[in-house]
C-alpha cells in the first residue's frame, strides 16, 4: 500500500507531493516537507489548519486523533469537504490492497 499526498495552493497549483507516513497527521507531514499549513490550536478547535478536500481514495479510512470542535462542511453524500490537517491522518490497517492511493487537498489561503 502506498498513499500519495498532493497539496495544492489556494489557486489549485500543485505545491508538493509526498508519500504518506503512517500515524502522522497531515499537518506534520506537510511541515516535514517544508509546506506551510498554518496550525494554531493543534486539536481540531480553530479551523486554522483546514484544507479543502479535492479527492480522497474511497479505500482510505480517516482516523481522527480527537473529535473536531468545529463543524466541517459535507457534500450531498455526507462526505467531508474539508479536513482539519492537525487532527487527521490515515491508519494503514484500513487499506488491505497493494494499490497506490492518492489524496489531494488544497490550502484555503
Ligand atoms: S490548528 Fe486548530 S483546528 Fe487545526
Image (tube, grey):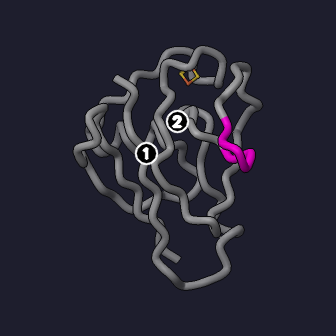
Q: Position of residue 66 (x, y in %)?
A: 74, 33
Disc 1 C-beta below 8 A from ligand 1: no
Q: What residue did someone put label 2 on?
A: 85
Q: Residue at x 64, y 31 (%)?
A: 73
Please give left or right for residue 73 compared with residue 98 in the image. right
Disc 2 C-beta below 8 A from ligand 1: yes
Q: Is residue 44 magenta?
A: no
Q: Is residue 75 magenta?
A: yes
Find residue 29 and report its image quarter: top left
Sort mark 1 into few (<14), some (14-19) or many (20+) by Cα contacts within 10 Å. Answer: many
Sort mark 2 into few (<14), some (14-19) or many (20+) by Cα contacts within 10 Å. Answer: many
Write down the region rendered in magenta. 74-79
Q: What residue did someone put label 1 on?
A: 105
**SS state under label 1:** strand
Please give left or right for residue 91 compared with residue 84 in the image. right
Q: Position of residue 33 (x, y in %)?
A: 29, 45
Q: In front: 67, or 102?
A: 102
Q: Residue at x 67, y 37 (%)?
A: 74
Please give left or right for residue 29 compared with residue 85 in the image. left
Vertical placement of 83 versus 7: above or below? Answer: above
**SS state under label 2:** loop
Find residue 78 and report its image quarter: top right
Q: In front: 99, or 33?
A: 99
Residue lying farthest to the front in this orientation: 76
Please give left or right for residue 78 compared with residue 11 in the image. right
Amino acid at each position: 500500500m502506498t498513499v500519495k499526498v498532493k497539496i495544492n495552493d489556494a489557486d489549485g497549483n500543485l505545491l508538493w507531493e509526498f508519500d504518506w507516513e503512517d500515524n502522522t497527521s497531515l499537518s506534520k507531514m506537510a511541515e516535514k516537507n517544508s509546506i506551510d499549513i498554518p496550525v494554531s490550536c493543534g486539536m481540531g478547535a480553530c479551523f486554522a489548519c483546514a484544507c479543502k478536500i479535492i479527492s480522497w481514495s474511497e479505500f482510505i479510512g480517516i482516523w481522527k486523533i480527537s473529535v473536531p470542535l468545529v463543524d466541517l462542511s459535507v457534500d450531498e453524500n455526507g462526505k467531508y469537504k474539508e479536513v482539519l490537517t492537525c487532527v487527521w491522518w490515515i491508519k494503514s490497517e484500513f487499506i488491505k490492497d497493494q494499490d497506490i492511493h492518492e489524496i489531494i487537498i488544497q490550502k484555503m489561503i
